[in-house]
Image (cartoon, helix red, strand yellow):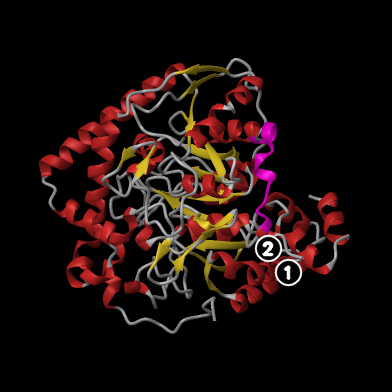
Amino acid sequence: MSENQFTRRQVLMGMAAAPLMDSYGGAHAGAAERIGTRAAGSETSSICFISAVEMAALIRAKKLSAREALAAHLKQIQSVNPKVNAIVTLVPELAAEAAARADEMQAHGETLGRLHGLPVAHKDLMETRGIRTTFGSPLFRDYIPVEDDIVVERIGRAGAITIGKTNTPEFGAGSQTFNAVFGATRNPYDLTKTCGGSTGGGAVALACGFAPVVSGSDMGGSLRNPAAFCNIVGFRPSIGRVPDPKAAFAWSTLSTSGCLGRSVADLALTLSALAGPDPRSPLSIDEPGERFGAALDRNFKGVRVAWFKGLGGVPFDARVRSVVDGQRKTFESLGCIVDQAEPDFADAETAFRILRAWGSANAHADQLRQHPAAFKETLKGEIEEGSRLTATDVARAEVAHGQLWRHFQAFLQKYEYFVLPTTQLPPFDVQIEYPTEIAGVKFGNYIDWMKSCWYISATGNPAVSVPAGFTPEGLPVGIQIVGRNKADFSVLQLAHAFELATDVGKRHPAIAQMT
């Protein structure tokens, strides 16, 4: 979904673009044994589906080099990416140089970061120094940033090696990953379906074994929606957990950066490098990221969990509801006391819609006036809507936003967690820009089908999407776990317990298995 950080990039429109770099398109002993006993092709695939936690341990133990890890992932990308279009800019030469330096560092006994030698793919909304960053817009088709976003900087400082950029909708607007620069990214479980968005390319990259570490961002569901559609884990952290020192709206609580993972433990490992305070961000949480490197195990006996009802009339596809409701017994088997209860989300309708449109207008109104043909109609309409807002409208949204926050926090005094579907329907046709109807309820806006995510975004609370099962057609379904204010680690602990109890996330798409 649309991220508010783009306002700061308006000034870049007049800058001359630099030449492109390389554009794509033209643990442990057990893991080591699995790698060593495979034939060449399947060995590559085996390496690419080792967990990030295991891969980091193997590299640290010198049982796998950074160069070997990179070579395996580049081979996987070459084989599978043309079918799914997840990686849109690839930088193999830069990555090879970085992998060689990583191995040399280790050989000389230098201190290693927690992500040392792991390949990472960054969302194409994240500025990467010296590497093309398009934001999915023709206006930035050839834009080469001169500095890294904080997410890229922190992951790099932890030792990860950038291999390229992943596809995103135009300026991250919408939960369907397509744009006029690179086209659509396809769901690896069914190539006729969407992968969701806006971190859609990143979700597919993880699902297909292109990288063990992937960055992303979330305003209205951009980390959780594609995770649900691609059978991986996506976490929207509390605002300020991953600070944005350059955010145009420094006090906004709608958008945040974060990451995805093939497991909760992998995601926590990446978050341990991403999280941490920054004095330039007023909402920065003053807690170190190392907290997320701790053990995720916890006893949930007697923990109270609220199970969604219908979010006040929000429509759900019966297939999604069936899968999610079928997992209630899993939480009960963990010892949780599960009640069907939910707060009133009426204020989210006012707050999120207005503040989102206001942010879009602030970020893109000038660009739209100068280049009206360069914007897709849905985003254009949202920008125009935001430009018509009055001070009274924005004040009304802020009041509703505050009321929603207080009501939700009060609700979570009784319950430690709120559980609901991540999405309202399974992955849909990749040729459709957005669903216009679910269960007979028609929509008039391109974000109406994602209320199950952006209602939660409006609260500001941490939320994770974890694989929950598959529809009869074999399409992934995610379940969303929401926790108390700033209780990010607690959310990951319950997600981890659920993941271990179900093993749904261990199912990988057949298309990603190399032969």
Residue at the outermost bottom position? 19
Q: Nearer the viewer, residue 439 or 488?
A: 439
Q: Quadrant of the C terminus?
A: bottom right
At a point 55% along the width and 41% down the height, the residue shown is 477
Q: Nearer the viewer, residue 70 or 381?
A: 381
Q: Is residue 480 visible?
A: no
Q: Helix or strand or loop: what does disc 1 sit on?
A: helix
At a point 43% along the width and 19% down the height, the residue shown is 341
The part of the image, by quadrant, that contains residue 471 is top right
Query: How far across and how far down the image is residue 48, in percent?
Result: 71, 60
Q: Is residue 5 magenta?
A: no
- The kind of residue tagged 1 is Asp
Residue denoted by label 1: 103
> Which stretch did the figure color magenta?
499-510
At a point 57% along the width and 46% down the height, the residue shown is 475
Mark 1, other Cα within 10 Å: few <14 / some 14–19 / many ≥20: many
Q: Nearer the viewer, residue 243 or 334?
A: 334
**CB-based contact (under 8 Å), mark 1 and mark 2:** yes
Horizontal relation, residue 485 to residue 190: left or right: left
| SS assignment for the magenta stretch, majority | helix
Mark number for residue 400?
none
Query: How far across and how far down the image is residue 156, in percent?
Result: 56, 62
Q: Is residue 500 magenta?
A: yes
- The kind of residue tagged 2 is Gly
Query: How far across and how far down the image is residue 200, in percent?
Result: 49, 56
Residue denoted by label 2: 117
